[in-house]
Image (cartoon, rainbow, N blue to C red):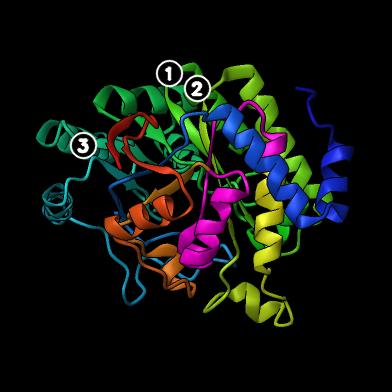
Amino acid sequence: MKRLTKEEALDLIKNKDLKELGKMADDRRKELHPKGITTFVVDRNINYTNVCWVDCKFCAFYRHPKEDGAYVLTFDQIDEKIDELLAIGGTQILFQGGVHPKLKIDWYEDLVEHIHTKYPQITIHGFSAIEIDYIAKISKITLEETLQRLKDKGLSSIPGAGAEILSDRVRDIIAPKKIDSDVWINVHRAAHKLGIKSTVTMMYGTVETDEEIIEHFDMARKLQDETGGFRAFIMWSFQGANTKLLEEIPDMKKPSSNRYLRLLAVARLYLDNIPNIQSSWVTQGSYIGQMALRFGANDLGSTMMEENVVRSAGATFDMQKGELIRLIQDVGQKAGIRNTAYETLELIG
């Protein structure tokens, strides 16, 4: 199959009939996943702290260290959350927090080791690129040493959080203190070289152009060509409630469902080397989340037993295991419960 160029992808975003674009992406999904299985994982988000100094304008979750509501979870509190996850058959924790100004590598090693030792059956999918970059800096060690030490203690993989749009122009507007695009890429490159797989995300709907979206896709595709370390691509729209960004740009329009499906389909076609595309029912709701399964997505993400970050910014959708199965079967696909590595653990129906 001929690889899409940037110019072709841009033309698809701007001009292609939505139904035709959806069919193109769906056909590509079928080529990559011919068994017709759509997956999800039973997991829980655990935000170990909401203390953060980065002050992203699009985030309503963070607190400064001495602000009301600021917290760092105790190990006992984390254990309680994992026990609740195990009770419903969960296999993964998505583990991330704010970028805490004082927590160093020793604290993170103790945390990961504690969880991995007490709950060896749980996969730790944790720490965004900016967290890892900052842990290295505050601990005065290299990025590679940081990743290796966390891996040695039980870290399995890292999420793609913090990518937003991989354009420094956009990042300087929406999160001026955040790491640059090339640093985000370098953290994931270093992780992949150490055998730590990851995902890549995209948050659109702020100030980016179509060209910058394509550049984001291209940076992900190039790194995947180099390392093969990305397991999945996950995309969602900016959720603006309670954020400084919406205060600064109050006339910012909420992206339409059409826009979501269009970008998702082009992502499936452009990211020809990333096997899995996740549907974001958390931000789009169950109907568009289900529609995404006809626009290139082959995964419904997770039951997300606990989600605090986008909820703080106004996303209020919840989903139980049975509902995810129904959404998948309703479009004629087989539902599969997977693990973090996208291996199917249980096929339903």
Q: Could you say which quadrant of the image residue 308 lies in?
A: bottom left
Asked if the residue at tag 2 contacts the one at tag 1, i.e. Cβ–Cβ closer than 8 Å, the answer is yes
Q: Amino acid at mark 3?
A: Ile
- Compared to residue 227, the image places residue 161 above or below, namely below
Label 2 vs label 3, nearer the camera: 3
Determine whether the residue tagged by mark 3 lies in a helix, strand or loop.
Answer: loop
Q: Position of residue 29 (x, y in %)?
A: 59, 36
Question: Which residues are drawn in magenta?
Answer: 268-297
Note whether residue 171 is visible. no
Label 1 vs label 3, nearer the camera: 3
Circle 3 residue: 122
**In this picture, residue 293 sits left or right of residue 208:** left
**In this picture, residue 265 sits left or right of residue 59:** right
Residue neighbourhood size for the residue with mark 1, other residues' Cα within 10 Å, grouped as few (<14), some (14–19), many (≥20): some
Quadrant occupied by the N terminus: top right
Q: Position of residue 299 (x, y in %)?
A: 46, 44
Circle 1 residue: 195
Circle 2 residue: 192
